[in-house]
Amino acid sequence: MAMHEMAKLVIFTALVFCPTWAWARKTQAQGSWAKTAISSKTDRTTTLQFYFHDIVSGKSPTAVPVARAAQTNGSPTGFGTLVMADDPLTEGPDPKSKLVGRAQGLYGSACLDELGLIMVMSYTFTDGEYKGSSLSILGRNSAMHPVREMAVVGGTGVFRMARGYAQARTHWYNPKTGDAIVGYNYDAGHDVRRRSE
């Protein structure tokens, strides 16, 4: 496998399935990709499930390498590769399914001894109650582990003061092109009070 292909394998991973909160008193559905549970007068928990489409091949890539260290070419893990992404988020895995937002940020190979990423991403939503709001994640993503967990470190709009987690599992990856369809699912607690308009 060529070094650039190894680096692609490191980069394309997925966030999937988190359990819903059984203790919630009220649930509001926002389509099949989002459910909100009210847990108190000031707090609620939102579970989101969507797919991002990380395209590195062709004429219109949505993720591009922006930096590589000199030693990256000799690294079996692609250590030192940094990628900038602006990936569409859809309701289902089909690229033609409903667009619900964009995943924007960067991720890079940050591990010498395994395929591991550091991810700094903002997920900005364009659908329903969450239109204009975003969630941010930061964390280590060990790409070859069956389940990975990263922290939700904040948000904007209806997700202001968000906290929670996302679990990761690879959904689909094309080793020939480096393209991936990635499933995401978040559980995020946040303040019920709405942002000022």
Image (tube, rainbow, N blue to C red):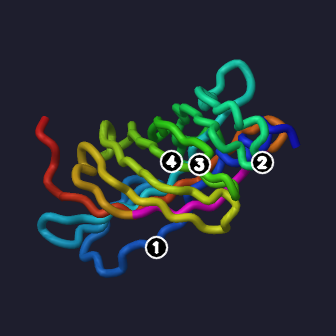
* Residue range highlighted in magenta: 165-174
Q: Earlier in the sequence, mark 4 or mark 3?
A: 3
Q: Nearer the viewer, mark 4 or mark 1?
A: 4
Residue 76's label in the rendered image is 2
| 37 is higher (above) or lower (below) than 92 | below
Q: Measuring 78% from the left and 40% from the top, which residue is drawn there?
A: 74
Q: Which residue is mark 4?
A: 119
Q: Which residue is mark 3?
A: 110
For label 3, count other residues whose C-alpha is less than 10 Å away and answer few (under 14), some (14-19) or many (20+). many
Q: Going by the picture, which residue comes out furthest to the top?
A: 59
Q: Going by the picture, which residue comes out furthest to the right?
A: 1
**Spatial CA span between label 1 and label 2:** 35 Å
Q: Measuring 42% from the left and 51% from the top, which residue is drawn there?
A: 137
Label 4 element class? strand
Residue 108 position in % (x across, y down): 58, 42
Left or right: where does residue 27 sit relative to residue 81?
A: left
Q: Which residue is mark 1?
A: 19
For label 2, count other residues whose C-alpha is less than 10 Å away and answer few (under 14), some (14-19) or many (20+). some
Amino acid, disc 4: Met
